[in-house]
């Protein structure tokens, strides 16, 4: 078996496909096919090529014939789901800002998978985008290095940080989780449970907010949490509701990490005769479509995802034009919407 060669430092410019091929010990054609995900490349060779590309921080450039500094009139937007209306609302707002400015929006769906996000970044950066809008801060090290090495203006969505040099527009998921938990604790109820699915970074931040509020009230019990890695849905919400009550029949309130789960729980409560809010208070998160039409109407946290999209796109426009950005971290806040369910 041919062994990979030792990488040599480059004094000018970035790494080339030939560099990656040499380091992996394969031909440039094989390296190209491996990086584009062709099934014809043996898995062992593909892994060697990916490792070499990561080591060299290589970004494919099909426009290498043009000036290296050339940029397209496109903006990459990476979201974790196209099935969740939270991100559809955000994408619509982004498009409303960028399209009139002459930019094409390239949408990538990461499916909450770090490897998928890395692959999308490699593919989209090859097209020399003018800017990027990326959801959250949790990703693998290879993806993080790709973003940094690209020097493409980037704004992060949905979450906040005070890290220097990082631009973001979002809200404190932890604070929002605390707010809804404190509301459910009202009236002397201490048995408040937390039910979550998907378990992405923002879900776990809401869980942290729940824990802080419960600990502050002196009634935190890890057994009151039910966490499922399955994709969040109305159907799953009903199943988790039934499972939870079987384990904890004395629970007084339930905080669901997303409205679709809470909607499913309310439907199951109607079917099984559990009275909400008399027996059990229920709250959700995100104020999705239909939450004000459930029986009873759902108490939830309204997140301004369209505003996040608009303000992030406007921030990115300033960055792409070389203009100063007055505030790098923009907190759009949230609203606790109290309805009949809690």
Image (tube, grey):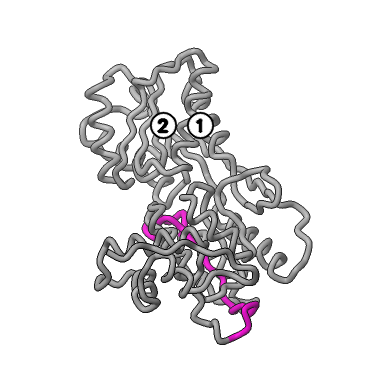
> Looking at the figure, which quarter contains the N terminus?
bottom left
Any part of residue 189 in sight:
no
Residue 261, how many percent across, how many down? 34, 41
Residue 22, how many percent across, how many down? 43, 70
Q: Residues within 10 Å of mark 2 (few under 14, many from 20)?
A: many
Which label number is shown at residue 4? none
Contact check, label 1 and label 2, Cβ < 8 Å: yes
Residue in front for this viewpoint, 337 or 151:
151
The span picked out in magenta is: 66-87
Residue in front for this viewpoint, 144 or 111:
144
Q: Residue at x 78, y 55 (%)?
A: 326
Residue 244 drawn above or below residue 306: above
Q: Is residue 215 magenta?
A: no
Any part of residue 315 in sight:
yes
Residue 238 drawn above or below residue 329: above
Residue 254, how many percent across, how many down? 38, 28
Q: Residues within 10 Å of mark 1 (few under 14, many from 20)?
A: many
Q: Residue at x 34, y 40 (%)?
A: 197
Residue in front for this viewpoint, 78 or 254:
78
Residue beneath disc 1: 180
Secondary structure, mark 2, is strand
Residue 196: quadrant of the picture: top left
Q: Residue at x 37, y 68 (%)?
A: 25
Residue 328 drawn above or below residue 103: above
Q: How many marks?
A: 2
Secondary structure, mark 1, is helix
Q: Is residue 82 magenta?
A: yes
Residue beneath disc 2: 255
Residue 58, how many percent across, how many down? 50, 66
**What separation in Å lies between label 1 and label 2 (alpha carbons)?**
8 Å
């Amino acid at each position: 078996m041919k062994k990979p060669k030792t990488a040599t430092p480059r004094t000018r410019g970035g790494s080339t496909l030939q560099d990656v091929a040499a380091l992996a010990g394969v031909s440039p054609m094989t390296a190209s096919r491996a990086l584009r995900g062709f099934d014809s490349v043996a898995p062992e060779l593909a892994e060697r090529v990916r490792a070499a590309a990561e080591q060299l921080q290589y970004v494919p450039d099909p426009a290498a014939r043009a000036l290296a500094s050339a940029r397209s009139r496109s903006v990459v937007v990476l979201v974790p789901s196209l099935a969740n209306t939270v991100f559809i609302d955000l994408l619509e707002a982004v498009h409303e800002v960028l399209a009139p400015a002459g930019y094409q929006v390239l949408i990538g769906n990461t499916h909450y998978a770090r490897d998928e996000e890395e692959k999308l970044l490699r593919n989209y950066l090859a097209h020399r985008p003018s800017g990027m809008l990326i959801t959250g801060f949790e990703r693998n090290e290879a993806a993080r290095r790709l973003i940094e090495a690209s020097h493409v203006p980037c704004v992060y969505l949905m979450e906040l940080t005070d890290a220097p040099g990082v631009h973001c527009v979002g809200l404190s998921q932890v604070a929002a989780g605390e707010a809804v938990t404190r509301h459910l604790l009202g009236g002397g109820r201490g048995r408040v449970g937390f039910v979550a699915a998907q378990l992405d970074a923002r879900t776990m931040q809401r869980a942290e907010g729940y824990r802080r509020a419960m600990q502050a009230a002196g009634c935190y019990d890890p057994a009151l949490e039910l966490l499922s890695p399955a994709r969040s849905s109305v159907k799953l919400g009903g199943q988790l509701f039934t499972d939870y009550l079987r384990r904890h029949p004395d629970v007084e309130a339930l905080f669901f990490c997303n409205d679709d789960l809470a909607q499913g729980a309310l439907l199951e409560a109607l079917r099984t005769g559990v009275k909400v809010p008399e027996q059990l208070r229920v709250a959700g998160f995100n104020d999705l479509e239909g939450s004000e039409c459930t029986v009873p109407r759902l108490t939830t946290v309204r997140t301004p995802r369209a505003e996040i999209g608009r303000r992030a796109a406007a921030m990115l426009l300033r960055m792409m034009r070389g203009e100063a950005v007055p505030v790098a971290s923009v907190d759009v806040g949230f609203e606790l919407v109290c309805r009949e369910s809690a």
